[in-house]
Image (spheres, rainbow, N blue to C red):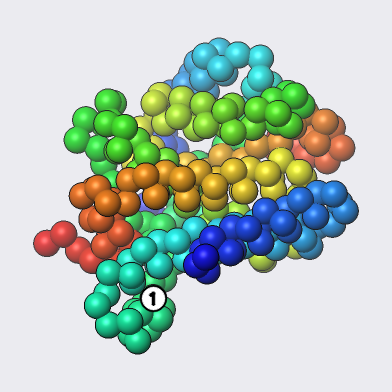
Amino acid sequence: MGLADELLEDAQFLANKGVRDDRQTLMRRAISTAYYATFHLFVEDFVEHWEFEDQRARLGRMFSHGPMRNAAFTPKEKKNPTAVEQDLLDVITAFGQLQKDRQRADYDSGWRLVETDVRDSIRLAEDVFIKWRKIKDEDIARHHLLSMFNAKWE
Amino acid sequence: MYLPSAVTKQAEIDAAVQRVQQAIGPDVLRIRYEIGEDWSGQWAIFFRIVLKDDAARRRLRDVATKVVWELARQLDFPAMGVFAYHNFRSESEQAVLQEPAWA
């Protein structure tokens, strides 16, 4: 099991315990960990194609949060995306949401979290895993991964 | 100073929000929003969606996905210059927290 999957399991564990014990710190860690699970999902997917195994960790450290969130995608027909395009749009939206909520969970001490906040973060992370793994070999997903790495089209 | 076009389209956004609420039905009690800069300084629209308790507890995945899809179908966020964020809570959670922004 890779780091991303382990982090997702940890996020699920922290969410359940945080809700059961009504403990804000655990709920915050659950949201933060859910984001990092998706972050490492993309990084792992990118670096596994790098031929030189001993360089993969270093390559992974070149990813940064801002460009990963800002990587944009527009379907060919905006109002009528294909199933693959819709999955990619869902992944992008969920990743942005997770990143924003992670920022808040880690830094906004005034945020009073409720169960739905935590359950929704876990749901989003699970959806990213399912949808990304379904589409990751598609051309648009491969190109999107490059965009997350800040690679320009031209 | 740059302002996204979403700032001038609040009537359009209000109408879209109403349509989304009608389309989804009673699981969604209300949708509030505000436009501002997010943590990274980028313009964003922050939706706050209050759900019926049963929807939040048992059907969060379905209802939340529908809300996000419907809002994206009704409103072209990239053209408005904003990233859309959606946060949910249940009616009883809001009853405890009593946050005006969600009322």
Residue in the foreground of this view, choosing between B72 and A7: A7
Callout 1 secondary element:
helix
Q: Nearer the viewer, residue A89 or A129?
A: A129
Q: Residue at x 55, y 13 (%)?
A: B22
Q: Is residue A71 above or below residue B56?
A: below
Residue drawn 40% across and 61% down? A42
Percent across and percent down for residue B90 are: 74, 32
Task: Please identify the residue farthest to the bottom as the structure is shown.
Answer: A54
- Residue A52 vs residue B55, the one in the foreground: A52
Does the image show residue B13? no
Q: Quadrant of residue A17?
A: bottom right
Quadrant of the snapshot with the C terminus of chain A: bottom left
Residue at x 27%, y 51% (from the top left corner): A137
Q: As drawn, is B26 to the left or to the right of A92?
A: right
Q: Quadrant of residue A87?
A: top left
Q: What percent of the width, then of the height, locates residue B7? A: 44, 38
